[in-house]
Image: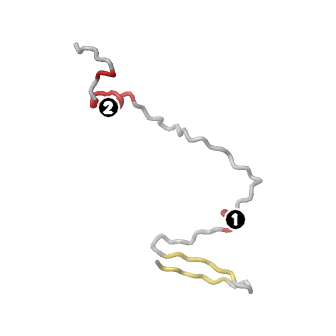
Amino acid sequence: MKKFVPYEKLSKSKKRELDRIKRVTWGSVNPVTRKVESKKLYKRKSRNFTDYSDGFGTFTFLLRTKNSRLIRLCILY
């Protein structure tokens, strides 16, 4: 039978081991507080922004000229 040793008198490694056993996960619960965005708010980014990056070090942008022509601009980096 093991002797009872108070937590304060345990070695650092034994305390860590006990703490690891007691620790539990939240499972499928995400503790981050969320709020629902108001539909009345103006969303500048979602309305005008489109990401045309292909993920390979190039960015493609569509530019509109004064006479409503679209120009596709590719930038390599």
Q: Position of residue 60 (x, y in %)?
A: 55, 77
Q: How is the image coloured?
A: secondary structure
Location of mark 1 (residue): 47
Q: Looking at numbered disc 2 in the image, what kind of residue is underneath it? A: Arg
Classed neighbour count for the residue bearing mark 2: other residues with Cα under 10 Å, few (<14), some (14–19), many (≥20):
few
Query: Which numbered disc, 2 or 1, marks the residue that appears first in the sequence?
Result: 2
> Which residue is depicted at the point 49% across and 76% down?
58
Q: Position of residue 42 (x, y in %)?
A: 74, 59
> Which residue is depicted at the point 36% across and 29% down?
19
> Which residue is depicted at the point 73% across and 83% down?
68
Location of mark 2 (residue): 16
- Give 38 or 16, whichever is nearer the viewer: 16
Classed neighbour count for the residue bearing mark 1: other residues with Cα under 10 Å, few (<14), some (14–19), many (≥20):
few
Q: Position of residue 55 (x, y in %)?
A: 47, 70
Asked if residue 9 is positioned above or below residue 59 in the image, the reply reads above
What number of labels is visible?
Answer: 2
- In the rendered image, the quadrant that contains the N terminus is top left
SS at badge 2: helix
Looking at the rendering, which quadrant does residue 46 occupy? bottom right
Q: Is residue 36 left or right of residue 2?
A: right
> Which residue is depicted at the point 66% across and 82% down?
70
Q: Position of residue 72 (x, y in %)?
A: 60, 82
Asked if residue 19 is positioned above or below residue 42 in the image, the reply reads above
The residue lying furthest to the right in this view is 40
Q: Is residue 4 left or right of residue 76?
A: left
Q: Is residue 64 left or right of residue 56?
A: right
Looking at the rendering, which quadrant does residue 10 occupy? top left
Asked if residue 13 is positioned above or below residue 7 in the image, the reply reads below
**What is the number of the mark on residue 23?**
none
| Dot in front, 2 or 1 | 2
Q: Looking at numbered disc 1 in the image, what kind of residue is underneath it? A: Arg
